[in-house]
Each structure stands twice: as structure tokens, then as C-alpha cells.
Amino acid sequence: MQKMQFWALLLFLLIGQKGWAQDFDDYRCLSASGEVPERFLLSSAQKYELGLAQLDPGLSNKDRKTQAKFQQQTIYSIDDLLRSGKVLFGTPVNDYVNKVGNRLLEHTPELKGKVDFFVIRSSAVNAFATATGVVCVNMGLLAQLENEAQLAFVLSHELMHVQKQHSLSQYEKDLAILKESKQRSLFKKTDFNSALLESNSYSRELEFEADKGGLDIFLKTQYSTAALKSAFSLLNYAYLLYDTTAFDLQYFNEGSCQLDPSIFLPEDSLNAISAWVDDSENTDTLRSTHPSTLRRWEVVEEAISGKTTGDQFFIEPKAEFERIRKIARFELASYYLHNFRFEDALYVVQLLRKEEPNSRYLREVEVQALHAISRFSMYEASSFMNSDYRRQLKTYSKIEGGQQQLYFMSSNLRAVELASLTLYKAWKLQRDYPEDKYFENYYRDAIYVLQQHVPSFDQLPEAMTAAEIKAYLAKAPAEQEYAVAKVTKDSLPKALQDVKLKTLFNSYRKSYGYSDLNKGYNIARYLLSDLLVDEAFKTDYEQVEDYHQQLMQKDSIDQAQARKADKKAKAPGLGIDSVLYVNPYLLAVKKAPKFLGETETSLDFEKRDEILTKFYGEVNKAAEKEGLHVQTLDNRNVEELDAERYAEVATIKDWLRFRMNLDSRHHPIFNQREVDRICKKYGTPYIVTGGYIQQGYNRKINTPIQIAVAAGAVSFIAGAIMLNAEMSKEEDRSFGLSYALLIAGGAAIGVASYVNADLKLGVVSEQLYFSSIFNTANSTYETIGFYNKIGIPKLGSLPRRIKSQIRKDIKRIKKQD
């Protein structure tokens, strides 16, 4: 065994590393590569048909219907994930997970060829499996693993979920509980909470079964059971980051950037890591679908007692495991950044820079995270929140682990101090890499943020020497006081409170008061000393407004918005020649009314695919007519899908999501570098996205309903006319036929209306269409189309009005006013 490990390690060092060597100094985040897995190349409708064909022919109609519904929901949710771009394939991390997973499949031959392993861009410390054989491992789990054996047990657990079809069992159980709950509720014997308790109790039973079955698989391998206790402990502390060591309070210190220790929490005020205990009795059983991890470990411990087990923590070379784990941790730094967990990103960067102190990637993430905190602090100030608003939130009080210090620091520093700290780090990064225009953008924008507090270079304090800084720090007060008066929106005169906040902030600045860094104690007083002796910095500070004006050069979208303000009745043209259509959100929801029952809703994959084809057909037809060059980037177009296009969709969607969460177009976007590369490839900075959602009824049901309503109306009107005629007679009145027609007509309308209650007497579909265009070069965007109506199109069709709106959008994009 030792000889085998030696040769495996040698082979890994000589050959394996070369194939996927990763430069951590200039790290680039993973993206899907290589051959696209087969699961991505079938449409949802095709997968659904295959799933139906594989159902047991001996099933009763009821069970068949239940399993078909389950197939539909599962396929849609998994395909939505697979198309999201969050799923990785063809990376070194995937290769490693596949090696471990395939070794386990040797001991579960019934699953061979039915299971695929994927890695998900998520910080969650877990994995999950579907009944269709998709096993997903989150990047957060890989970042926290201590050895390969832990991964093997987690995968064994998930394979058992697949083998036992636990997700289907849970679905069927939930349906049964829901049905029984409805029956009982008629007699007030139950409520929603009791049904949820029963469902979660069954879910916990399945987890114990997966542990037991997974252990059986695990015991057939050479892996050591000594790794299992720590595996359950790892899952218990999933809410923590991968390391809990104390944050180095000197981490940010260099040159004149010396942070006063008083801005951090005293050590005795930090939260202790919670003990690992069996919290079954205290667990919120309404919310928890998993049993206590300690209880799970105790059951497993009892099961392995006295059994002969393997003794290996690693079967693949340990060096390979450590490298994969390091990659996962580098990935998390970017993940936290893109998911607005800026303090977590800073903490991970601090940990990783102990190993890679000069990593350009880590330094960039650090500046991006600091800048985001500083920018959002500035937004709070311009919204007239209290100057100690972030302190009042006390987010840090709920945090365990080393990152608690960073949460406290970000809420404890004044906005001007955060701006100064960010500017220092951005200045250093830009000075070390002067050729990088993206670092230049962060540096310039960091100056802009500081100028919102100190508008003129002459108002900055004089530079301090190292000795003066040391003496200044020695005089630090035990508790800092704010030099700037607190001015909130509520403190303004009532007449001014409804004025647009940004305009109000700028006009009311004198009362608000700029920061005077020479008054009171603040770290911004000395922190910028290194910059103040830099000859170029004064010029940069004075020219940054010109720099922002250059960024604001009016493009066609800006100009259109300005003209639109003057000509509200007309949407001006944009004069754009080429655009990239990216992954519009398309959805078809089928509704089936039931007599004396609730309307059933379900997703219709086939109709959605029809809409997708018709949507792009209409876009291309309109673009050809107008002379607009249109390219499409859509992960649902399986004929065109390759790994590069798949990764490009994910990158652009991240850019769009972050842009829509910003108040200012000038805030640099984290993945701008990658988006610029993509846009250069396609030859345009303009991206169009949006969506079309259609919800309607099956036409076969609608027609009889409409006929019934029409016939009922005719009968009712005829009965009313006859009744009126009989009433006008003085004798020989006969009301029988009149009443019969009235009753029959009213009954027909009533029954049809009940069945068609959601349709408003024959209106069979709701539809929402929207589209926007973005200029990725300067972050401007414009809504170009919106339509929200109730109509009567057949589900899966592209109605005339939607086609018309698409043509209008294309014409407006191309048209030059």
C-alpha cells in the first residue's frame, strides 16, 4: 500500500500538476471547461419524457400521476440550477470529486451510469442529491474538509439518498400529510404547524437512514472511520468560515496605515464558539429537517463499534487534496465578495495571504471588499441615516469566529475613516500594478468617495511622520466620539423631508458639515500621510472630478434618458448597431381548473421551449428587418452550448445582478474585467436581457367554458325577454319556460364561472414581458419594453402584442434620433 501511494504521489507531482497547475499569485476563478456533460444537452421537456418512460408500468394511475408531478418539479429545479452557471464541470476540483465518487460507485454497482457528480459555487458546507442521480458538492464543503475520508463519507450519504429515492419518498409523504391535514382541518383537529412537524420528523428519519446506508458503502472502502466524528463536527459548525483563528489586528498596518487597536473589540468581548451538543430538545422542529449532528454521530459511532475498518485518511495523494482545498478557499473569497459578504471576504483573504502574501488576486479582492463597504457607508450618509447607523445595527454581535472583528471594524469606523483606509489600499495596489486599468478605476473611485467627505485637497490634514503617528495613537481616547454632527432626514424642516434625498443631501451639505479631520480623534487624520507626500496624489485628487466626468460621457442611453425627460410622450431611439441577447427569463405556467376543487398549477417545459424558439425567432426576424446585429448567449440553446458560452452566461448574470443593486453607475463592478473580455469577443458592450412569463389554461378546457358562458348568457337573456313579455300580458300568463331558461342560463354561467374562477369569465392567460439594455462599458441601462396584460392567447404561443413589443424594442435600439 505504501509503495502504491509513493508511486501515485510521484505520478501526481511529475504529470498531474502540470495538467491543472494553478498560479495562486495571479489566480483566476474557475470556470466550466471541456466537454459539456450530457445532462446539460437535453431540454427539460426531453428529460421529462424520458422520466415518464422509465416509470414502473405497474403503478396505479394515482401513483403514476404523483411520480410524474414529482419528475416535473425535480427536473425543473435541477435544470434551473444546471443552467444558472453556478455548476462547475471540467475543472480540477470536479476531477478530484469524481475520483472519490467513482471509487464509491465501485461498491454500489446498481448506481453506476446513473449518477453524476458536480461542484456548486456556494459557500454552504454541505452536499445534496436528487432522485435523478445528480450529486452536488458545494465549494464551501471542499474548503472546510480536513481529509479525503470525510468527503468520501458525505458522498456515501448522498449516494444512499439516490439509491433509496428519498426525495421522492419525502414528496409523497408531504402530499399525504397535506391531504390528511386538509381533511382534519375541516374538524379543526390540526393546523399547518402540526403538518410541518410531521413532515420534518419524516425528513429526519430519512437522514438517519442515509447515514446508516452511507456507512455501509463507506465500510467497504479503505477509508478510516476515525475521520467520521470530525466529519459530523464539521457539519455542525457549517455556519463558521473554514478557520476560526483570531483576526490579526495588525493585518492592515503598513506605512502610515496604522489602525488603532481601539477600533476592534477587546478579546474578552468576542463571542465564544458554541459547544457541540445534542440540541435536539432545543432545535426549532418547525424549521429543522435534519437531526442533531451529535446524535447522528452517536448512532454512527454505535454502528461501527467492533467492526473492522480501513485505515486511510487519503487514497489520492495528500498533496492533491490540499491543493484542491486551497483552490476552494480561493474561490470562496470571490464568492463572498459577489454575494455582499464583504467582511467574510476580507477574513478569508487575510487567512490566505498568510500562505500567499503577494497574491495579486487576493489583494484585488481585499480592495474590492473594502471599497464596497466604504461605498455603501457613503450611500447611508447620503440617505441621511445617523452617522452611527452601522453601529446601531450591531451585526457583529451575532457573529462567531475570527471575522467578528471585521464586522465590528466596519460598523465602528466612521464613513470618512473607511474611505481613507480603502483609498490607502487602492493607492498601494495601483502603484504596484500601474498598467492595470481596473486597479486604476478602484483607486480613482476611492478618491471620489473620500471627496464626498473632504471635497478639496487643501482640506486634507498635513502628513505625519512615523514618530508623530505613534504619538498620536498614544493619545487615542478609550471611546471615540464623532466630530460630525448627526443630521437625519427626520431632523430636517418638514417642508424638506419629501425632497429627493440625493438632491437634498447635496444642498443641505453645509448644515450636515464636511468632515474636519483636524478636529477630534480619527484615524483619517494620519492614515493618508504616505499619499500626501506622493507628488502624483495631489494631481490625482484634484483631477478625479474630471475623471468621473469622462466616465459620464454621454452615450446613446444617457442621451435617450435626457430626451425622454423632455419628451415623455415619445421613447427616443438609441442608435445602437449591435447587441448581445443574454438568457431572458422565460416561464410557462399551466393552470388546470377542477370542479369543486382548487385550481392546479404546473410548469410546462414543452410550452416553455416553444416560447424560447418563437421568442428568438421574433427577435432575429425584427433585427434583420431593422438592420440590427443580434447575437444570443443562452444556456437553454443546447445546440449552441459549449463550456465557454456556459461560463460566459454566469459571468454576465453576476455583473447584471450586482449592477442592479447599486445606486451609482460609477461603483466599479467586481467582475468587470471578465465582462469586458466577453463583450470584446462578441464585438459589442451592449447587453439586452429581460423575460416573458405566461400563465394560462389548457385551450381544450377554455373552449367548453367559453361556450358554456355564451350559451348560458343567451339562455338567460332569452328567459328575461320572455318573462318580460309574459309580465306585460293581462291574462293567460305562462312563466314556466321563462323561469326554466333563466335558471338554466344562470346555472350554466355560475358553474362555468366557478370552474373558471381565476379567468374572469373566459380571460385565460396572464402575461408579463419586460426588457432592458445595459452598456457594460459605463454601467448605464434603460428599460426598453414592458407589457403586463391579461389576454386570451394559447399557452405556449407568442401573442401578437408580445411580438409587436419585441419589434418595438428592436426598432428603438437601432433607431437613431
Image (tube, helix red, strand yellow):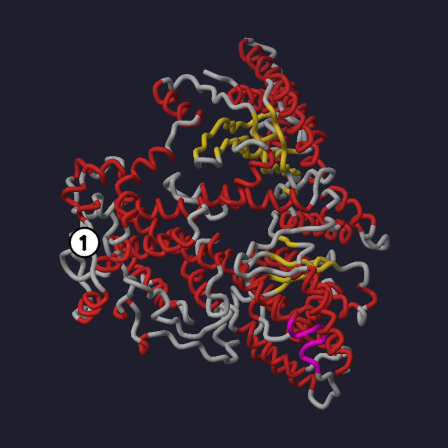
In screen coordinates, is 598 left or right of 396?
Answer: right
Direction front: furthest residue? 535
**Residue 88: x and y, percent?**
64, 54
**Residue 276: x and y, percent?**
50, 79
**Residue 649: x and y, percent?**
60, 43
In screen coordinates, is 136 left or right of 459?
Answer: right
Given the image, on which type of amino acid does mark 1 rest? Answer: Pro
Chain part drawn in magenta:
312-319
Magenta region, main secondary structure: loop
- Does the image show residue 197? no
Does residue 812 sit above or below 18 in this rendering?
A: above
Direction right: furthest residue? 57
Q: Nearer the viewer, residue 555 or 121?
A: 555
Question: Where is the C terminus found, in terms of image quarters?
Answer: top left
Q: Is residue 318 magenta?
A: yes
Element marked by disc 1: loop
Q: Which residue is mark 1?
A: 461
Does residue 618 sit above or below 225 in this rendering?
A: above
Q: Nearer the viewer, residue 800 or 534?
A: 534
Does residue 703 sit above or below 12 in this rendering?
A: above
- Image quadrant of residue 752? top right
- Does the image show residue 139? yes
Question: Where is the N terminus found, in terms of image quarters?
Answer: bottom right
**Residue 145: x and y, percent?**
59, 72
Q: Is residue 550 magenta?
A: no
Q: Nearer the viewer, residue 147 or 672?
A: 672
Q: Count the numbered circles shown.
A: 1
- Crowdedness near tag 1: few (<14), some (14–19) or many (≥20) residues, C-alpha within 10 Å: some
**Residue drawn at x 56%, y 9% as measured from the top left:** 729
In screen coordinates, is 3 left or right of 809?
Answer: right
Does residue 721 sit above or below 553 in this rendering?
A: above
- Image quadrant of residue 506? top left
